[in-house]
Amino acid sequence: MTFLSFGSNSSCQLSQPVPSDLNSPTIIPVANLPTSTSTVIRSNGNHTLLLDRDRSRLYATGSNEFGQCFIPCCDRIPVFQEVKITDLGTDDKWYPELVAAGWEFSVVVATTDDKSKQAVFVAGFGLKGELALDEKLVSTATPTRIANFVPAHRRIVQVSAGLAHVVVLLDDGALWGWGNCRKGQLGSANSLLKSAFLPVRIIDERIPDCYRPAKVICGREFTGLIDANGHIIVLMDYSKPDRHNILRDIPAQAQVGSNWKDFQCGWTTLHVLLSSGKILSWGNNSHCQYAPEDAPIAVSMSCGSEHTLIHASGGVYVWGWGEHGNCGNSVDLEGGNVNVGRAVQVYDGNIMFLGAGCATSWICTE
């Protein structure tokens, strides 16, 4: 297997030890990095988490000023380094199951070896409740367990993070979250809090009692939900102008019944991958974030802050905002044209998985 990265690397968030941007897929210089089809990349701000779910092994790289890599504070972690999750309050051994990366913080959902217990650990910095540790504790440089969470007899099945908020989906369909919530991203019932410094149940009049999300995603200041029948709900401030057209431009064909394969978003743009391989996009298109008409049939997609990668026949294609090389070398930096409005092939090979973050792109090949 070969693991490659390209794009923004000022803090070595690409796991490339020289802190400079790269505009072509470059092999990561880390030996014996375990990767498989179950591996996921979560990249935000200037740090990246890699979770091998088969082996319950977690790695981190990039900015670590606040300990957001779950490693004692330092300027940066130059390449992927394995991370161990420990809880000083118990003798339990914890194994990572799910991960999410926010702007300057990280979240790990972990379980004990026998899976009898589940807990959420956080690290990093956040003034708006991103750590869910109380408003008096907005920074922690070591993995810290959120107290009295997860709800009894329930398990977390998904976790997603925006720049400053986190949402988790439980196995009974309930939604909980914390962090910035003044724009409705944690449901209308919590908007008056402005910031949720402890986990809160997400309640919104737009979510029917019978609605059970199949996937939850977090944009910059919104939360997106989709159920098995393709019914999409966006949680945001409905009282303010919809300046990114997130609500107004939801395409009718996005309500596609069960005919969808994936649902992802960038900071201000949403995308649905249909079973046919076509991608529907809406919201902000100021940086050519929409799937272009020439995009080939996609097998999978990965959406970064303002760009998207897809795996299609012939390899990997990308479009969107590419100022830091995350869309390859197809932008005209000198001319100021940093947007890619067509599907550009950046790699040809057998693809295992893709990843995308804040101007970062990742490819793992067989």
Image: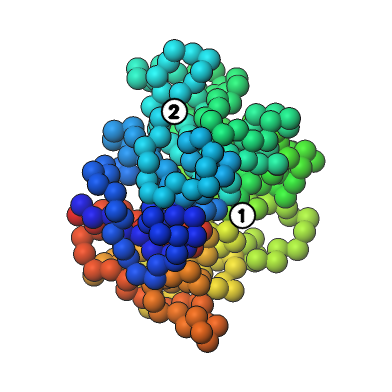
Kind of residue indicated by mark 1: Arg
The residue under label 2 is: 85
Q: Residue at x 40, y 59 (%)?
A: 18
Residue pointed to by mark 1:
220
Q: How far apart, in angstroms, are the residues tagged by discs 2 and 1?
A: 27 Å
- At a point 70% along the width and 47% down the height, the residue shown is 184
Residue farthest toward the top in the current orientation of the protein: 91
Q: Secondary structure at mark 2?
A: loop
Labels 2 & 1 near each other (Cβ < 8 A): no
**Along the viewing direction, whichever of 349 and 59 lies nearer the viewer:** 59
Image point 34% across, 34% down: which residue? Answer: 57
Element class at badge 1: loop
Position of residue 225 in the picture relative to residue 279 (left or right): right
Rendering coords of residue 264 (x, y %): 48, 55
Q: Amino acid at mark 2?
A: Ile
- Residue visible at 38% across and 63% down in the picture: 6
Name the foreground residue: 283 vs 348.
348
Residue 50, percent across and down?
38, 44
Give coordinates of residue 46: x percent, y percent.
52, 53
Q: Is residue 159 visible?
A: no
The one nearer the camera, 293 or 177, is 177
Q: Is residue 3 left or right of residue 255?
A: left
Direction bottom: furthest residue = 335
**Residue 366 in sight here:** yes
